[in-house]
Image (cartoon, coloured by chain):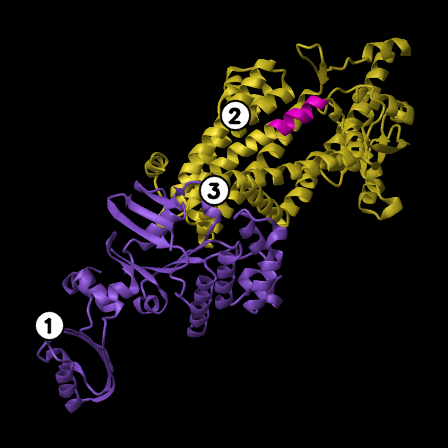
């Protein structure tokens, strides 16, 4: 027990001093956060302060581009959350009766390339015939053709204005028009068996992917680390001293628990970082229209930690086999490659599992050895699996880990002192039987 | 003297090769026992079974009459493997502490000993260096410290002199004698017969996985009689092998070891030699271990094996 502890301690202390650990611990969450929040942040910034000139050939759409109309339109778009990214500063030019609109627009178009104060981000031309000719076209000039968000918004404002005008031309009262034009928004609500409600289906998809990656990546990275560590001990020839001082299983369990402790430290740091960044993240996320807090109820943390450990130990044990059986990293990579591909299967099928967490595929995978931790975690995240499934999955995983540990320590005993060439899978099986 | 270790009819087979084939011997407490044999004779495999790295296919290894499978057994052995190696990236002191901890010691117990050993091997200023920053000779010393640090009763050294320069060789030789005189037991595996001859009290000679000879060095040598001539000379001594009454000869550049036939007179050989060589040493005595080994295994067998390689 003390020996195992000594190995655990050494493994842990050596690992957390390594650059890899520091990079993984501090940069991974930043990277993930960037991946997650950057697009929405950028979009908000992109929508930030846009100066737009609207040249209205009809001369009657002033009201459609007024500030009041804008904010109510925004409320409509964002489903009434009130907060909305982006601000359009619109300069409305009444250009009634102008038949040479592009000519009049020229000075404004030049200002698209102008400096600072004078600079415009977009110019919208509304031809005079827009009200009467259904084939008339609005023209939107901007520096980038991809600023479709601004374009869509301006177009929608203009069209709304045009619709209002057309309707009032038919003699409808302004109040009636408002009523007629009211659009109804869609709310996606997931109803779980316990009656809990979650919204934001598309976000679940992204968050599910992200958290699974957070679960999976450390398992692989540290799996590789432990494999490398074992091979290093073999090439350093220190392993003979080790196995003459303790049993191979003491060594192996010590190592794996040491690496597991490293992993737990890592997610511990992540959780602290998450808590610190929580306010910011929640705010940012709600800006982007995602209520991230709905995923972070207490059971989430429990499941994350439980399935993290299970996934972690499963993968790390599998990698330890590679390390124990081979003498060089290259050989071990080759041996472990097919196993890795199989273990990655749930990841490749993640889209199907997230979108359909109660499908036979997802249920089967979540109860299967090796695939269980990852799949079951996703199911708890986006679905509402019955407790019996969760417990079965945990038990299956524990049994898998015990079996892997047993096989690994057998292979370890034979493999650590064989400096020959890489064994084949049948040879490995013989090692298991011999030891 | 009591026995500290008894190896009984131990067998180990790898695939189809019988690396150790029914080896039995005992190690007496407070002695240096030389485990001798050529490379591939089965010495290392035997040692790996004693240290618990391999399980024997059959036979037993008994440690002070208790079974050799307990954890305490491992802690009482200090083992210097033939394949040297420690963690290259670890600092000296951390490394030694770890290696003592896996032998069941507490860090606080061994700290003073670490200081003592580092001082003795003139490594005190390197205590915070990583192993890979040390010279090869110093790395060997660190490994030796790691072997002895936890104060083991039985010290097992597999080819301790391989890779050592002559100065360190003497250092190790003296250290081993000193440890023996302190009452520790040493099992020394080597293929260098001359080295074993200088240190061992007892010898166990292994060939092709079997013990061909064992006992105290004195007994073994005297049982091979006093009919061996050791000659040191200047000149070409090739003719010595052709002299009458020389049943076996090992001729080196300036030295020869001649085994005489029964009833032959060493003086006659000396006379014949003096005519053609300048003699610097002439000694009649027991054969060297090398000669004993050759006689025991058979020169023809050895030559055939040599050809196979």
Q: Are marks 2 and 1 on the same chain?
A: no
Instruction: In the rendered view, tell whether residue B193 sits above or below residue B270.
Output: above
Name the residue located 83 percent from the left edge and 15 percent from the top edge: A166
Q: Which residue is mark 3?
A: B71
Numbered disc 2: secondary structure: helix
Q: Which residue is mark 2?
A: A397
Q: Which residue is mark 1?
A: B262
Q: Decide: few, some or many residues near mark 1? Use Cα within 10 Å; few <14, some 14-19, many ≥20.
A: few
Q: Write the start and end of the magenta stretch as one range.
A: A298-306
Q: Residue B191 placed where, x, y %?
A: 31, 63
**Left of A358 or right of it: where is B243?**
left
Name the residue located 47 percent from the left edge and 57 percent from the top edge: B85
- Give A369 or B11, whichever is nearer the viewer: B11
Which of the 4 quarters of the picture holds residue B258? bottom left
Q: Is residue A357 visible?
A: no
State which chain disc 3 sits on: B
State which chain disc 1 sits on: B
Cα–Cα gap, marks 2 and 3: 31 Å
Q: Decide: few, some or many residues near mark 3? Use Cα within 10 Å; few <14, some 14-19, many ≥20.
A: some
Q: Are marks 2 and 3 on the same chain?
A: no
Q: Residue A109 placed where, x, y %?
A: 81, 41
Drawing shade for chain B: purple
């Amino acid at each position: 027990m003390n020996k195992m502890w000594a190995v655990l301690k050494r493994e842990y202390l050596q690992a957390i001093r390594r650059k890899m650990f520091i990079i993984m611990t501090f940069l991974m969450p930043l990277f993930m956060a960037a991946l997650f929040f950057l697009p929405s942040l950028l979009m908000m910034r992109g929508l930030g302060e846009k100066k737009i000139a609207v040249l209205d050939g009809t001369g009657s759409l002033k009201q459609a581009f007024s500030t009041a109309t804008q904010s109510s339109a925004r409320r409509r778009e964002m489903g009434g959350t009130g907060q909305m990214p982006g601000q359009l500063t619109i300069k409305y030019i009444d250009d009634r009766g102008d038949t040479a609109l592009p000519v009049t627009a020229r000075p404004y178009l030049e200002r698209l390339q102008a400096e600072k104060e004078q600079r415009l981000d977009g110019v919208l031309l509304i031809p005079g015939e827009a009200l009467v000719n259904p084939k008339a076209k609005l023209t939107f000039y901007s520096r980038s053709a991809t600023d479709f968000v601004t374009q869509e918004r301006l177009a929608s404002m203009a069209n709304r204005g045009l619709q209002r005008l057309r309707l009032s031309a038919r003699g409808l009262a302004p109040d009636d028009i408002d009523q007629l034009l009211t659009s109804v928004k869609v709310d996606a609500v997931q109803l779980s068996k316990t009656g809990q409600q979650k919204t934001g289906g598309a976000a679940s998809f992204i968050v599910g992917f992200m958290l699974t990656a957070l679960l999976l990546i450390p398992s692989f990275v540290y799996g590789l680390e432990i494999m490398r560590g074992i091979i290093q001990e073999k090439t350093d020839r220190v392993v003979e001293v080790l196995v003459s001082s303790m049993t191979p299983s003491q060594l192996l369990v010590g190592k794996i628990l040491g690496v597991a402790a490293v992993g737990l430290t890592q997610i511990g740091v992540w959780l602290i970082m998450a808590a610190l960044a929580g306010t910011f993240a929640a705010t940012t996320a709600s800006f982007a229209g995602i209520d991230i807090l709905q995923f972070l109820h207490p059971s989430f943390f429990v499941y994350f930690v439980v399935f993290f450990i299970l996934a972690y130990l499963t993968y790390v044990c599998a990698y330890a086999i590679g390390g124990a059986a081979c003498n060089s990293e290259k050989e071990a990579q080759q041996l472990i490659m097919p196993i890795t591909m199989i273990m990655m299967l749930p990841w490749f099928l993640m889209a199907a599992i997230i979108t359909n967490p109660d499908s036979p595929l997802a249920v089967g995978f979540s109860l299967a050895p090796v695939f269980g931790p990852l799949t079951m975690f996703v199911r708890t995240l986006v679905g509402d699996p019955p407790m019996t499934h969760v417990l079965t999955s945990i038990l299956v995983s524990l049994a898998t880990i015990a079996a892997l540990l047993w096989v690994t320590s057998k292979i370890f005993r034979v493999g650590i002192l064989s400096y020959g060439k890489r064994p084949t899978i049948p040879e490995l099986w013989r090692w298991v039987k011999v030891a | 003297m009591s026995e500290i270790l008894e190896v009984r009819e131990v067998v180990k087979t790898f695939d189809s090769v019988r690396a150790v084939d029914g080896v039995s011997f005992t190690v007496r407490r407070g002695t240096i026992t030389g485990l001798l044999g050529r490379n591939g004779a089965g010495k290392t495999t035997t040692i790996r079974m004693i240290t618990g790295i391999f399980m024997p296919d059959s036979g037993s290894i008994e440690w002070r009459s208790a079974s050799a499978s307990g954890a305490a057994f491992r802690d009482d052995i200090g083992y210097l493997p033939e394949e040297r190696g420690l963690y290259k990236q670890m600092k000296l002191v951390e490394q030694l502490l770890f290696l003592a901890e896996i032998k069941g010691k507490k860090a606080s117990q061994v700290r003073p000993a670490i200081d003592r050993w580092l001082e003795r091997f003139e490594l005190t200023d390197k205590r915070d260096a990583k192993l890979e920053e040390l010279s090869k000779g110093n790395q060997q010393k660190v490994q030796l410290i790691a072997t002895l640090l936890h104060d083991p009763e039985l010290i097992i050294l597999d080819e301790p002199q391989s890779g050592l320069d002559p100065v360190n060789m003497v250092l190790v030789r003296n250290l081993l004698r000193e440890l023996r005189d302190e009452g520790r037991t040493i099992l020394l595996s080597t293929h260098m017969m001359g080295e074993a001859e200088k240190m061992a009290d007892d010898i166990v000679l292994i060939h092709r996985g079997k013990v061909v000879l064992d006992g105290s060095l004195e007994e073994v040598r005297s049982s091979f009689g006093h009919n061996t001539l050791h000659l040191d000379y200047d000149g070409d001594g090739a003719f010595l092998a052709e002299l009458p009454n020389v049943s076996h000869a090992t001729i080196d550049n300036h030295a020869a070891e001649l085994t005489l036939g029964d009833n032959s007179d060493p003086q006659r050989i000396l006379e014949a030699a003096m005519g053609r060589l300048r003699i610097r040493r002439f000694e009649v005595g027991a054969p060297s271990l090398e000669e004993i080994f050759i006689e025991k295994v058979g020169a023809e067998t050895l030559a055939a094996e040599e050809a196979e390689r």
